[in-house]
């Protein structure tokens, strides 16, 4: 996943286990998030419905109280209020004031607005449209009750605390002020019944969050164990394939896992058997060729020496030399690229030191220079790697007089650049020089023309590559890249 503006790439895991866990986590979070949103929406709708019903019930009680006070003579109303306060434990805190009290009102929310609308509608239905009705929500600490503006804490506990306090929640107080007559306002303060005391929109409950976390953890653990169990045969198969590519004797892979993995393992075992049989037959073939050809060539040389005509003898000698060169070249190619060694950690720095040491001068002006070094051991065949790098250095010294080695190593690959000071190679022949016995015109140095080809074959057997590049300042750069085994 790549963004256009910043070029940031989402860190996708490389292993099958990591990708399965990431995919499972995303699916679980999406499913749980969607179900939680639906559940919270339904919960909020149910709570809103219950809240409005409770508000209407509370408003009906308020309307009954207002009707009762209206029916009382004006002189008896303060006496009734005093009796109610003395008794305590009532649902409302009621007082008569000569004007509406001013208090700091709480800001609107969907739940507050729904309650205020429901209460005002019920009161209007019972009291009509004439009286002035003020319905608001106030914090307990901002609540004022009498004309003098007394706070809740300044009143006797029996008067108001039992009706307006619900510690430790301290929910907002519903204050309703109704004008009974000019200069006479009925003040009613009350709390909404539980569980509707909280008027703020609730987020996902903590229990639901913990449920999602625990469910996701158990599911990821189960999926992780399952994928690890199923992917283990694939890891063994990959390890066997890599070891076989390096020429190691590989035991048949145990067939296990799912049906698809079993089919792959079975096909790999069949391929391993065919390749092993082919390599064995090839080795026997070249051994037979080596034995069968050397004897007649030696016999022909003895017969050529018996010829009396020196010119004919020279011609036969040249033909035999060419034939022997071809046979030796072919056998040398097979010998150098099919080295039967065990795979082990190789100190590439030590290998290069052995190759470079004969050409290094104490004065620093030798035929070979080196920059950089390997950072860690490399898993491969020691002798084959030594021949590979040795061929590259020898080729640079043979055709370019000097060899300049540049090493770059990291966790992904070991890279060796071998630069020479020769004339380079024509662009159209950069690949052709890897062919057996191919040599550029005008070069008369001794050799079979197999060095670069052998080096590339050894690099291929280690999963690497050898490439050529002409340098702008002159000379040829030969690059050996050996990838490291990244688990």
Image (cartoon, rainbow, N blue to C red):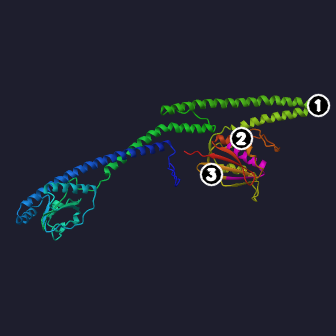
Q: Quadrant of residue 265?
A: top right
**Direction bottom: furthest residue:** 148
Tell whether 332 sits left or right of 44.
right
Q: For residue 393: magenta?
A: yes
* Nearer the observer, 170 or 113: 113
The 10 Å Cα crowd at callout 3, few under 14, some 14 to 19, many 20 or more, is some
Quadrant location of the C terminus? top right
Residue 309 bears which disc, if any? 1
Q: From which residue to which does the magenta span run?
A: 384-406
Mark 1 or 3, nearer chain start: 1
Residue picked out by circle 3: 409
Q: Which disc is residue 103 wearing?
A: none
Residue 217 visible, this angle? no
Q: Marks 1 and 2, Cα distance to the nearest angstrom?
A: 41 Å
Residue 8 counted in the magenta span? no
On screen, 185 above or below 460?
Answer: below
Q: Give the SS element for disc 1.
A: loop
| Number of marks | 3
Residue bearing mark 2: 454
Residue at 58% over, 50% down? 411
Judged from the image, the secondary structure of the residue bearing numbered disc 3 is strand
Residue 122, image x, y percentages: 17, 54
Mark 1 touches mark 3? (CB < 8 Å): no
Of residues 245 and 94, the one drawn nearer to the viewer in this rendering: 94
The Cα atoms of the two marked residues, 2 and 3, are separated by 23 Å
């Amino acid at each position: 996943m790549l963004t256009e503006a910043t070029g940031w790439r989402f860190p996708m895991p490389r292993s099958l286990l990591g990708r399965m866990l990431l995919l499972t986590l995303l699916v679980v979070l999406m499913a749980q998030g969607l179900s939680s949103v639906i559940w919270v929406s339904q919960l909020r709708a149910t709570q809103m419905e219950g809240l409005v019903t409770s508000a209407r019930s509370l408003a009906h009680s308020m309307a009954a109280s207002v009707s009762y006070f209206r029916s009382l003579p004006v002189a008896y109303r303060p006496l009734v209020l005093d009796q109610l306060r003395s008794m305590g434990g009532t649902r409302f805190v009621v007082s008569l004031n000569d004007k509406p009290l001013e208090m700091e009102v709480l800001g609107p929310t969907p739940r507050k607005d729904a309650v205020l609308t429901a209460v005002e509608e019920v009161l209007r239905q019972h009291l009509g449209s004439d009286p002035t009705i003020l319905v608001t929500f106030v914090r307990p600490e901002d609540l004022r009750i009498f004309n003098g503006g007394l706070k809740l804490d300044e009143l006797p506990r029996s008067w108001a605390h039992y009706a307006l306090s619900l510690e430790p929640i301290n929910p907002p107080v519903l204050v309703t002020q109704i004008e009974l007559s000019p200069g006479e306002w009925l003040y009613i303060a009350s709390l909404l019944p539980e569980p509707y005391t909280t008027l703020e929109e609730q987020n996902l409950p903590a229990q639901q969050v913990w449920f999602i976390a625990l469910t996701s953890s158990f599911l990821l653990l189960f999926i992780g164990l399952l994928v690890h169990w199923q992917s283990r045969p694939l890891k063994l198969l990959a390890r066997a394939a890599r070891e076989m590519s390096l020429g190691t004797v590989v035991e048949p892979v145990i067939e296990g896992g799912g049906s698809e993995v079993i089919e792959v393992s079975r096909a790999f075992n069949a391929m391993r058997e065919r390749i092993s049989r082919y390599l064995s037959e090839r080795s026997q073939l070249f051994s037979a060729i080596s034995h069968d050809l050397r004897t007649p060539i030696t016999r022909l040389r003895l017969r050529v020496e018996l010829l009396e005509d020196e010119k004919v003898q020279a011609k036969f000698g040249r033909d035999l030399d060419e034939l022997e060169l071809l046979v030796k070249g072919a056998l040398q190619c097979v010998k150098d690229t099919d080295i039967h060694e065990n795979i082990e950690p190789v100190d590439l720095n030590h290998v290069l030191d052995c190759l470079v040491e004969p050409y290094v001068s104490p004065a620093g002006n030798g035929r070979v220079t080196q920059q950089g070094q390997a950072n860690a051991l490399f898993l491969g065949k020691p002798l084959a790697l030594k021949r590979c790098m040795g061929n590259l250095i020898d080729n640079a010294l043979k055709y370019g007089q000097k060899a300049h080695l540049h090493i770059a190593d990291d966790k992904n690959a070991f890279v060796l650049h071998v630069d020479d000071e020769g004339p380079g190679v024509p662009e159209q022949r950069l690949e052709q020089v890897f062919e057996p016995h191919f040599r550029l015109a005008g070069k008369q140095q001794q050799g079979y023309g197999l060095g670069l080809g052998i080096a590339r074959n050894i690099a291929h057997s280690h999963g690497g590559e050898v490439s050529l590049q002409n340098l702008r300042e002159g000379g040829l750069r030969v690059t050996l890249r050996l990838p490291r085994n990244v688990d």
